[in-house]
Image: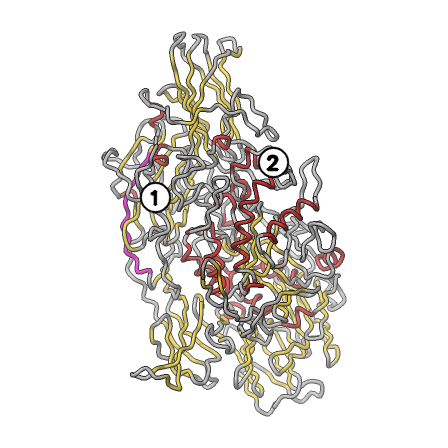
Amino acid sequence: MRFPSLIAVVGLLVFSTFALALPFDGNASKPRVNATHTIEWDKHSLIIDGRRVMIYSGEFHPFRLPVSTLWQDVLEKIKAMGFNAVSFYINWALLEGKPGEFRSEGIFSIGKFCTVAADVGLYVVARPGPYINAEVSGGGFPGWLQRIKGHLRTTDADYLAATNNYASNVAQILSLYDINNGGPVILYQPENEYTIPADGFTVPDPQYMQDVEDQARTGGVRAPFMNNDAFAAGNNRPNTGAGSVDIYGYDSYPWGLDCSISDWPVGGLNTDMASLHANMSPETPLSLPEFQGGSYSSWGDAGFEKCAQLFNHEQVRVLYKNNYAAGVAVFNIYMIFGGTNWGNLGTTDGYTSYDYAAAIAEDRTVAREKYSELKLEANFLKVSPGYLETYPDPNVSVGVYSENTNLAVTRLFGINGGFYVVRNNDYSSKNTLSYNLRVSTSQGDYLVPTNGKSLALYGRDSKIYVTDYPIGFHTLIHCTAEIFTWKSYHDKTVVVLYGEVGESHELSLASPLDVASRVASPGVNIVTNRSDIAALVSWDTTLYRQYARIDNVEMLLVDRNSAYKFWTTEISNADLPDLIIKGPYLVREATIKDDLTADGWTTATATLYVRADFNETTDIEIIGVPQNVTSLAINKVSTPFKIDSDGHWLATVYYQPPSLNLPVDLTSLKWKYLDSLPEIQQQYDDSAWQTANLITNNTYVTAPNTSVSLYGSDYGFHAGVLIFRGHFAATGQESSFQVTVQGGDAMACSVWLDDVHQISWAGSSHMPSAGVIFSINTLEAGSKHVFTVLVDNMGLEENIAVGGDDMKTPRGIMQYNFYDSASGVIENEISWKITGNLGGEDYKDKGRGPLNEGGFFAERMGYHLPGAPHENFTDIATSPFIGVNVPGVQFWTTEVELDIPSDRWDVPLAFQFGGDQPPPKAEYRLLLFVNGFQFGRYIPHIGPQTLFPVPEGILNYKGNNTIALLLWTTGAGNGAKILGGLKLVVSSGVPILTGRYDVIPVMDGLVEGWKERDGAY
């Protein structure tokens, strides 16, 4: 489907009247003109504009890709898989960094994202929380919520009042894109995983959920409400009174969230989904707002490459087809594209990458096999209307449809087609099964294959067999090969079927059929003399394409890996059947434009324009080109072609990659240096700092053990490093000093007394706090001294437990004491100053948002931004790879000039620490800034991340780039340096010849470079 352009008029959006729902006729993605839009539902599916629609969706968080012109690239890749929807969270913490000041603009624009989704032709599932979890800092709650007394996610008045501004603004924006107003937003999710209560609380609280829903309705949202129970608990299901939703949904992560597990877990397949749903919400469609598309990864884990090996194409085949066996009709994969936890937006137990082992990798590549497997499955369901009218058998059958008792079968009964989903009974088994299957059809029961051969299932696989399956004006009585797609054109119906190499398959076609008109490739057998069917086609799958044509039904018989190379592509500007295109790395869009005469008159012919991507020289095949089209242009380049005897267009795109000056070895560049810890210098003036003089409201999670609050969020500092300066007059009895700090998992701290480094804690993967103690040389009574304490805030906790206030877990100094030589506590008052990012909630860089900067001196001054003055920096003959032999925090900056022809080539880049070998696990931590955006938090001794993708648009591919590093010494010794080197590399391996639209650098109007900051210190 294609949505109309969204036109802003006097602050409102006016939509034209293309329909959003599509017939299941093999070309179900086409729009049709309609004056109004309606959305309804029943036990089977959503019904949009009177037509049943399966929602096949992927989760994508635009805030994790802060280049709005790349949103279309990712959304086109989602659409190209055969999906028809995108689901997205909205992160409150990024939009209301200061209470009462809501900003949804630039890289944080909700409206822009919805507009692009509509332009691409995707429905939208909006999930604004206000709590979202999502492995983001605070679970999406802004840090200033730590200051309210009320319990979070409850009816406490100050909590609800705190949400009102955000909820009202978001609802008003989304209402403009509501399906009932002609937009793409079809579902709205109030709250998130409102399931698990903290001790002393009850879930659900009907009034609380009703309050959240009322905020949306008051703001103008009319789309149906769908919830997402954390598991199938039945909370807030329809018709249960206050707080009930329209459509009940629950999330499912059957393998848990752990990238380090070595193999498929026991009990990792839920086989009771159909019966569970029938008992909980029998009048709404089975809806999975989140189903496991991978996992997040924590500090010290194995990393996402290992994660992707676990959550792979086999997991998709077995687990996802199990969902179809249960009749899922609203299906969202979390995540389909993970993105990046740039700029401190992640929660404490995650690192910079949020790749999630998703089908689309963090660098936006689609080379993972699971992407192709998902494309096969989504395209099949897209052309299978009967699926949405089936009744799944609530029980998995063993020994009923096959005599092989190692085979598990689930049947879906339907009047417009039947479906049999098969797999190994032990879902994790790697054994090969040989079997025959009993199927029921309109022509009677069959044991298939009927030719005496056997079917095969190779280990971790699952298959869907169909019966009485319509393909245009014809019907497959039964089919043992899996269907990628079918399309009806003016002269024929084309079906693409696939299996594993070596498998035996057959299908039967019903009458009427002119069986006298038939042709097949060698090895394909056609039988036409049976009374119950018109034709029986049988074959063994090979590495080479086979075919059969009977009457006007053309069957392409391929192996699975060959099927991966097929795409279905709508002609976005015409109400014509989708094209079937084979070959490219990615197919984005097809359009048809009438040819013109020299004086501008329309001719009777037209040109087909295809936007596609290529990673090698590729032979292309296009099936279904309309008769009046006589020319072809691929990525705006006129492309010669031939037409074969079947009417398929054949062309070749030649891949000639450009010469790129990559990788860039950053060790060879000239760097400038600045001491970014001037706070330890004797003459340093902290008079502009915030005096720590507040008494905290934040006592529920951790009661303070200090006379005044030393919690960062009490003073408006919610992200990045916190720096404390503690002034005291010595008594002369001080022998040691102990301080306990808290920053979240993998946090670090360092302490100086005056200008002398005393101690550091380098961090450990799952230690959120640390207590350090050190000896003090005798201090003269009455002498004045200063402690400088650095605490790394690794992100705020999430708030999964309702009412539990875990998000209020403080960051800062929890407790401190002087001790005398007898280990007795000395009473000695310390006057504390505190800083984080400059301005706190009055943050200076509105374009990059409230979380991008922390409290380091270079950050407060804005020296990480493009255009910052570096004339006062030390221009020394060294670099961060040689280091400075003093403890503290080093700031390094350099410039990288790029000249990449990104108008034709997509060249994903990443900063690689170390080379072919992992870098040494030294005890330092580093922040990587690229043109002002913090795009890397590197802790080599904890890991696992060493490769940091940075998207085009953050990187300027046609000009200068400011690269800055903040290097904090936390290990033993006097200083730190980057070990193992640093390069800017092509993460995709090769450049990709692309048909995407141009990427506009965010520096071109969305964010600013350096300018002098008033009051900077």
Q: Are marks 2 and 1 in contact (CB under 8 Å)?
A: no
**Residue 422 in sight in this render:** no
Residue 771 x/y as whole percent: 51, 24
User: What kind of element bears circle 2?
Assistant: loop
The mark found on residue 253 in the picture is: none
Residue 509 picture quarter: bottom right
Q: Which residue is mark 2?
A: 805
Q: Secondary structure at mark 1?
A: strand
Q: Main secondary structure of the magenta part?
A: strand
Q: Identify which amino acid the numbered label 2 is placed on.
A: Asp
Q: Disc 2 or 1, which lies upstream in sequence?
A: 2
Residue 1003, above or below 638: above
- Asked whether, in this view, residue 282 is left or right of residue 80, the answer is right
Q: Is 581 located above or below residue 889 in the figure?
A: below
Of discs 2 and 1, which sits in the foreground? Answer: 2
Q: Nearer the viewer, residue 174 or 799?
A: 174
User: x, y (%) of residue 843?
Assistant: 41, 39
**Mark 2–mark 1 distance (CA, rounded to whole Å):** 41 Å
Q: Which residues are drawn in magenta? A: 891-902
Quarter of the image with the C terminus in it: top left
Q: Is residue 666 magenta?
A: no
Q: Disc 1 residue type?
A: Leu
Residue 982's disc number: 1
Which residue is nearer to you in this view: 43 or 877? Answer: 43
Crowding around mark 1 (Cα neighbors within 10 Å: few <14, some 14 to 19, many 20+) is many
Question: Picture quarter containing residue 667?
Answer: top left
Can you give x and y, in whole percent of width and height, for residue 703 in the image? 59, 26
